[in-house]
Every structure is written in structure tokens, then in C-alpha cells.
Image (cartoon, rainbow, N blue to C red):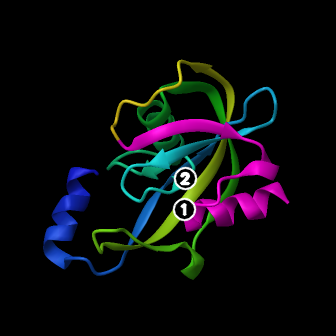
């Protein structure tokens, strides 16, 4: 978590606030999508995270992709921007957020799969017909919207 978010949490406690970030769609050659088994929630979700101060959306996507998956991309294509009450989230520790996320497709992905930020229990590719049952609600909404 970014230091400035910790500072905000120290001021407001667990009350909801708006977090801006990026979500990244990574597909393998078989057309399967990369999901991250998150350590904090125990659910499967999409790679991505919160924007650092001074970053643009693409820089956030690039940094989060590398940190969470060990992968890099030659380019990012903006697919959607999601926000609103459907993207409310309460973390297991009680922190509440409303997320605004630029959703990108990573293009020409390379690297060795394996994140370095300690946020993942596992990383795996799934077909759209065999997505895990225990999905992060925000990721499930994004995938439902984009895969149908």
C-alpha cells in the first residue's frame, strides 16, 4: 500500500474514500486470462492497483503488472474505465473504498511469471468458461462486462 494511503487512513480510519488505479488484462496465446490469487482477501482477481502520486494511468498499469506478476508489456491498450457504487469494496481489515480503475489490456507481454510484492498466493491463467468460483467482486464485474 502506498505511503500516502496509509497517511490518509491514519486521518480517516476505515471510512470509505475513492481510490484511483489501474487494472490489467493479460491473455496468453490460448486466450486465457491471467488471475491473481490475492493474499489479503483469499479471492482471485485481476492484476492491478492504486496509482502512486505523480503517476499517469499507464505508469500505474506498468508498475503494478511488474510488481504483481513479474511480467512486462510493450504497450497498454485502454479497454474501459470503471467506477461507481458497484466498485465499492471492503477489505478484510474493515477499510472501505470506492474504486475508479482504468482497465488496460497488456500487449506483447514478456517476462517470467511470479510477482515480487508479496500480494499473491498464486498466479494462473483461466479460460472464460472455467473462472474460479471465489472471485473478487470488482474483477468479476469487469470480466462479466468485457468477456460477454
Residue found at x 28% / y 81%? 15
Q: Label 1's element?
A: loop
Q: Nearer the viewer, residue 145 or 135?
A: 135
Left or right placement of residue 15 versus residue 12 in this view: right
Q: Position of residue 19 (x, y in %)?
A: 41, 65
| Position of 106 relative to 129 (above/below) | above
Report the span colored magenta: 119-148
Q: Is residue 59 visible to us here?
A: no
Left or right placement of residue 147 versus residue 39 in this view: right
* Residue 125 placement: quadrant: top right
Q: Position of residue 80 (x, y in %)?
A: 69, 57
Residue found at x 57% / y 65%? 138
Q: Position of residue 76 (x, y in %)?
A: 64, 36
Mark 1, residues whose alpha carbon is within 10 Å: few (<14), some, or many (≥20)?
some
Residue found at x 71% / y 58%? 143
| Position of 62 relative to 8 (above/below) | above
Residue found at x 72% / y 35%? 27
Q: Position of residue 21 (x, y in %)?
A: 47, 55
Query: Which quadrant is home to the C terminus?
Result: bottom right
Left or right placement of residue 26 versus residue 130 in this view: left
- In the rendered image, residue 16 lying in the magenta stretch gets the answer no
Q: Are dots 2 and 1 in contact, CB under 8 Å? A: yes
Left or right placement of residue 104 versus residue 95 in this view: right
Q: Is residue 46 visible to us here?
A: yes
- In the rendered image, residue 122 lying in the magenta stretch gets the answer yes
Label placed on residue 136? 1
Q: Nearer the viewer, residue 24 or 91?
A: 91
Give the alpha-carbon distance from disc 2 to disc 1, as whole Å: 6 Å
Label placed on residue 101? none
- Residue lying furthest right: 148
Mark 2, residues whose alpha carbon is within 10 Å: few (<14), some, or many (≥20)?
many
Disc 2: which residue: 44
Amino acid at each position: 500500500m502506498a505511503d500516502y494511503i496509509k497517511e490518509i487512513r491514519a486521518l480517516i480510519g476505515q471510512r470509505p474514500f475513492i481510490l484511483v488505479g489501474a487494472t490489467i488484462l493479460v491473455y496468453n496465446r490460448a486466450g486465457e486470462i491471467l488471475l491473481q490469487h490475492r493474499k489479503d482477501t483469499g479471492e482471485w482477481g485481476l492484476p492491478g492497483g492504486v496509482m502512486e502520486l505523480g503517476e499517469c494511468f499507464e505508469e500505474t498499469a506498468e508498475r503494478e503488472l511488474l510488481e504483481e506478476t513479474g511480467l512486462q508489456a510493450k504497450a497498454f491498450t485502454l479497454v474501459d474505465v470503471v467506477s461507481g457504487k458497484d466498485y465499492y469494496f471492503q477489505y478484510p481489515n474493515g477499510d472501505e473504498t470506492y474504486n475508479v480503475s482504468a482497465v488496460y489490456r497488456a500487449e506483447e507481454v514478456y517476462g517470467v511469471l511470479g510477482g515480487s510484492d508479496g500480494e499473491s498466493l498464486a498466479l494462473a491463467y483461466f479460460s472464460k468458461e472455467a473462472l474460479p468460483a471465489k472471485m473478487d467482486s470488482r474483477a468479476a464485474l469487469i470480466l462479466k462486462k468485457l468477456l460477454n
